[in-house]
Amino acid sequence: MRLIIRWVVAALALFAAAYLVPGIRVEDPNAWVVYALMAVILGLVNAVIRPILRLLSCPLIILTLGVFLLLINAISFLIAARIAEALGVGFFVDGFGAAFLGSLVVSVVTVFFNIFLKDPEEKQVSINKS
């Protein structure tokens, strides 16, 4: 259930990015199918390629106090968009600037939804000291 919730949140975040960022567009009449497929592609890129990028750029991440992670997010977003483009999914990102803004929007929307959509199985243990 948790995976499906994350998948839907990622699709909604991609919808928000396509709506807000001028360089991101979806050219398909079945737009929600495109957002769902792109959410899967982005999840796979974040699971496979992003850790490699983080490992290779670890000195830059430390040097910039984590700001370089924003560029890694943008690169991951651009790679996912290029994979989707190659597969004919219908999700297009015009350049690095659009990928950077799109990754910011996706990150903010994902964090916002995750705050309000807590998994009911994750119960917080409270310690009462009397």
Image (cartoon, rainbow, N blue to C red):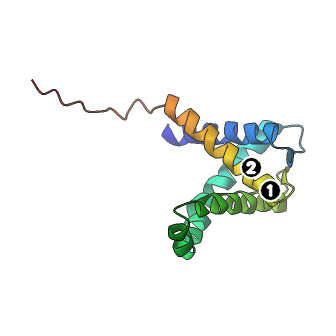
The image shows residue 76 at horizontal and vertical percentages of 67, 61
Residue at 71% across / 57% down in the picture?
77
Q: Is residue 2 in view from this perspective? A: yes
Residue 61: assigned label: none
Q: Quadrant of residue 41?
A: bottom right
Res 10 quadrant in image = top right
- Residue at the far front: name it: 64
At label 2, which amino acid type do we have?
A: Leu
* Left or right of residue 25, residue 126 in this image: left
Residue at image coords 50%, 69%: 62
With 10 as the anchor, is 63 left or right in this view?
A: left
Q: Nearer the viewer, residue 63 or 74?
A: 63
On the picture, is 95 further left or further right than 103? right
Please, what secondary structure does the residue beneath circle 2 have?
A: helix
**Residue 55 seen in the current view:** no
The 10 Å Cα crowd at callout 2, few under 14, some 14 to 19, many 20 or more, is many
**Marking on residue 101:** 2
Numbered disc 1: secondary structure: helix
Q: Vertically, is 128 above or below 94?
A: above
- Rendered location of residue 68, percent (x, y): 60, 63
Quarter containing the C terminus:
top left
The residue type indicated by label 1 comes to Gly
Tell whether label 1 touches label 2 (CB within 8 Å).
Answer: yes
As drawn, 79 above or below 99: below
The picture quadrant where one finds residue 93 is bottom right
Q: Whole-Å distance between the Cαs marked 2 and 1?
A: 6 Å
The relative height of residue 22 versus residue 94 in the rendered view (above or below) is above
Mark 1 is surrounded, within 10 Å at the Cα level, by few (under 14), some (14 to 19) or many (20 or more) other residues, namely some
What's the mark number on residue 97?
1
The picture places residue 31, in percent across and down from the top left corner, at 82, 38
Look at 66% across and 62% down and name the residue there: 71
